[in-house]
Image: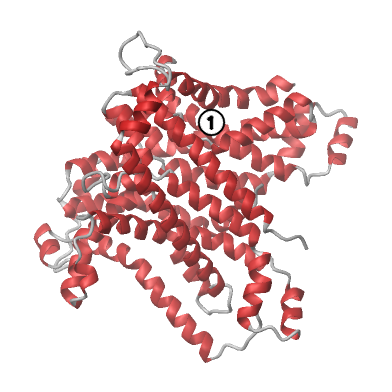
Amino acid sequence: MQLVFVGPALLFFAAVVLVPFFMSIYYSMTDWNGVTRTVVWTGLDNFRTILAADEAFRTSFWFTTRYTVAAVVLSNAVGFALALFLTMPLKTRNALRTVFFLPNVIAGLLLGFIWQFIFVKGFAAVGQLTGIAFFNLPWLGTASTAFWGMVIVSVWQMSGYLMVIYIAGIMNVPKDLLEAAKIDGAGKWQTLKSVIIPMVMPAFTVCLFLAISWSFKVFDLNLALTKGGPFGSTESVALNIYKEAFQNNRYGLGTAKSLIFFIIVAAVTSLQVYFTKRKEVEV
Amino acid sequence: MEETRYGGRLLALEIAVIVLALVYFVPFYFVLVNSVKSFGDLMRNTAGWPEAFVWSNYARVWDIMRYPLAFMNSLIVTVLSNVGLVVISSMAAYRILRHPTRFNKLLFALFVAAMVIPFQSIMIPLVKVVSSSGLMDSRTGLILCYFGFGVSLNLFLYHGFMKSIPQEIEESAVVDGCTPYGVFWRIVYPLLKPMTITVVILNSLWIWNDFLLPSLVLHDAGIRTIPLQTYAFFGQYTKQWDLALAGLVLGVAPMVAFFLAMQKHIIAGISAGAVKG
């Protein structure tokens, strides 16, 4: 019985997740190149190389961190604001929710290509028509505009998904609590600050978690929109790992990077869940 | 939020949000309108309406991308991965919940803990595992990988949902002579339907749109999924925007159609799937 019910799940999970995970711990301490049969044990050499001498990895880490902060803050702010507006009795709110959510059903890779066209041709066309300097910037051409290009596309995509979760959270705020706040003479801002935000803390926990892990692991969008350029300035950690392993054929070094990546992602997301969970209130 | 009359302030807000929605929609306008222009028209007049509709862009891309083939590949992979995931994770969740032995509790903790492992942290050795099992370059290999990567979240969601199913129904079925498999498939499984819908929606959005895993496992042109085929196509036709945009529209269309048809379920599924931990 146990075998029939749990066996298949455990088998695939072990073969696809657990075994590769332990293999990556082992290979991170070797000079594996993916081709030769003999693999030499090198101890912590890979980690030393990465920490001491790998400029590109450090750049990619710094980029990913800045990108994550910007994308997480902005997409949650926009998502929450949209949720507040679209829980008010607007006449077109269902159609509006659909529009804001739509970018989420499209593959990140395709979005990257779509926005490449928008930045290169679309913005230029709008700039010509309106003369607004913002649209005439060399989008994707310089390090800082390419960075904000990545952020803009991510906020455009993620905020609709987060909006759906925030809407569910706001709808769950008990009506009598809002009534009570009104009777006690709370204004709109006060109701938002002292009733709604504390009551939707569970939604904040989930949304921050999702936004942080999506942004930290960004790959498809990065590959399609900027390919890491110009000059590696917008290369995400995930893309850096991918190139190290599958383009430079330094599998050992790549697994060492991916292990460092795992530790940081796990630490950041667990800390975030721990801290926001403490702020959740029980009714 | 509050029961106010629909007055001037709400109208102003409504207009502001509609304007924002139009801004959100602008990229789609650019892509759609330019996908039916001739190349010259597209370069000269990117923002405007096409001077003539060049539908042949689509016909050409349809053939170059071998679109029907890529569509079928995506469909096969997504459907079979979903079927397998629903079966293995609902069964495992049921057993773990109803027989909370020390082993099963540990196993559950392991499944949940593994959700924090980023795919990129295990993809390099995974390629080795897949190729040494002889499953490289096969849709079967890809589907089996999705079983392993999806099972954690699916099992977790089923486990949480099953807690609300009263055990008495199962006990009375056992008294009536139902086998354990009968109890699960005839009584428990049908009750899981709302969660099954959520699970299938979350899996489909992920698997249909996934690029990195299939790019590592599938190389033959004949078995590529839509994102892979779009990537290959885009690589060949960069800067040939008339064709590239038609290709992007074809790539995006199935998921948008799926979303518009299943909208209610998708929105509900995402809200339900998010209420975890």
Q: Position of residue B141 (x, y in %)?
A: 44, 24
Q: Tell me the amino acid under the disc marked 1.
A: Phe
Tell me residue B102's x, y (percent): 77, 26
Camera-side residue of A252 and A46: A46
Q: Quadrant of residue B3?
A: bottom right
Quarter of the picture holding the C terminus of chain A: bottom right
Q: In front here: B277 or A111?
A: B277
Residue at the top extreme?
A: A38
Query: Residue B65 location, x and y as percent?
Result: 25, 41
Which residue is disc 1 drawn over? B147
Answer above or below: position of A222 versus B219: below
Tally the marks: 1
* Residue B13 falls left or right of residue B31: right
Give the quarter of the image for residue B188. top right
Q: Considering the numbered disc 1 on the image, is that residue within a helix, a strand or a loop? A: helix
> How far across and how far down the image is residue A268, in percent?
53, 45
Q: Residues within 10 Å of mark 1 (few under 14, many from 20)?
A: many
Q: Quadrant of the N terminus of chain A?
A: top right
Residue B69 showing in the rendered view: no
- Taking the image as drawn, is residue A226 in sight? yes
Name which residue lies at 66% across and 49% down: B194
Q: How is the image coloured?
A: secondary structure
Left or right: residue B15 versus residue B23 is: right
Name the one closer to the observer, A44 or A177. Answer: A44
